Image (cartoon, helix red, strand yellow):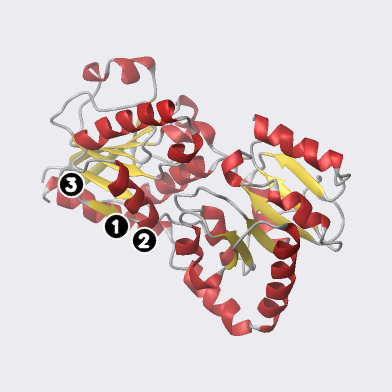
Amino acid sequence: MKKFNVLIDLDRLKVLNTGLGQVAYLFGKELSKLNDPRLRFTFLVPPKFKGEFGNNVDYETTSLIRRYFPFLCKKYDLWHAIHQDSAYFPGDRSISYLLTIHDLNFLGEKTISKARKRIKLLQFKVNRAIEVIAISKFTKEVILQNLRLDNKIVTVIYNGVEHQTSIMSHKPVFLPDGKFLFTISVVKQKKNFKVLVDFIKDLKDYNLIIAGNKSGKYAKELEASIRAKGLQSKIVLPGEINAEDKYWLFKNCEAFVFPSLHEGFGLPVIEAMNFGKPVFLSTYSSLPEIGDKYAFYWENFESKYMSDVFLEKMTEFSRNTEKQLEMKQYADQFTWEKNVGEYIKLYRKILQI
């Protein structure tokens, strides 16, 4: 019985401690468990990740030859790009190409000319794709509004979330004493973390941890704002953190706060719910879809309003044990097993097996 060779592009492992890096790692981890009688998987990975997922899958490493001369490289029956910004592409048009799109955030972040260039490149990939996957209904709508699909199917497959509520770890060294709120993402303008500065200033009993890459201009401006208001002891930006610290912070925070303006999905939202934590979100992009009725929402970012909503809803949450249980049950639906299972069905449909 013929086995079909499927290439899974996990290039985003190169930025492991980011949302996309974690998606690549956890998707690969779950997929590598399978022994499908008709599918053989090859993971395209940065060189240091060769062998990371065991011997149940094959490996191809990212390289200049793979990037610029793909026609010289191994052929596959199906190529799955798990993120739209990968620099790698199948060289042979006979290879079926499946494209997962996480977001079109650049439409709100870039200048008009830069956004047009990004759309043009993405349109090329969509034209080449046999099918397109969106990670949320919100992302699907943005795709339909901004790209020509030419009757291609756009399917929504939600990301999975790693369930690690029992992880053993120690209190991070950067954490100040006292109760704290937590948020995590790359510290960029689209994450809107500046609104949390005056918000936390109004909350005398709480500190705030903002974890994530802080190498950019926005992060520097955020740290300057914190210093200007004398809040260095209340707001900590530790930069990128490891998985152990992340899960400790989720487990021990009082609440998760996420005022982001642009999200294709918002993995940390479900991670926080999985730990049974109250979640406070903006009403922008995919967040109302992912948070659903189980999160609390800020309709605007005026600091007094934000702190009033926070205190009111924290009291409400603490008294409503039924909602806490429903929230955790809702979060339990977002598993990598379910995510990978839906992709396997899709692979089989495309390959007609």
Which residue is labeled 3 in the image?
Answer: 152
Q: Secondary structure at mark 1?
A: helix
Q: Nearer the viewer, mark 2 or mark 3?
A: 3
How far apart are the alpha carbons under marks 2 and 3? 24 Å
Q: Which residue is mark 2?
A: 338
- Image vertical order of residue 327 relative to residue 148, above or below: below
x and y percent of residue 52 in the render?
Answer: 46, 37
Mark 3 surroundings: few (<14), some (14-19) or many (≥20) residues within 10 A? few
Please identify the quarter of the rendering in which residue 160 is found: bottom left
**Gap in Å between the C-alphas at discs 1 and 3?**
18 Å
Q: Of tags 1 and 3, which is closer to the observer?
A: 3
The amino acid type of the residue labelled 2 equals Lys
Is 221 placed left or right of 336 in the picture? right
Q: Which residue is mark 1?
A: 342
Q: In the rendered structure, which disc, 2 or 3, sits on the residue that comes first in sequence?
A: 3
Which residue is depicted at the point 57% across and 66% down?
273
- Tag 1 near tag 2, CB within 8 Å: yes
Q: Where residue 121 sits: x, y (%)? A: 32, 28
* Residue neighbourhood size for the residue with mark 2, other residues' Cα within 10 Å, grouped as few (<14), some (14–19), many (≥20): some
Expressed as whole percent of the image width and height from the top left, the position of residue 62 reads 39, 24
Q: Position of residue 278 (x, y in %)?
A: 64, 68
As drawn, is 312 to the left or to the right of 32?
right
Instruction: Please name the amino acid that badge 1 sits on.
Output: Glu
146, 44: nearer the viewer: 146
- Element under label 2? helix
Q: Quadrant of residue 114?
A: top left
Whichever of callouts 1 and 3 sits on the residue coming sooner in the sequence is: 3
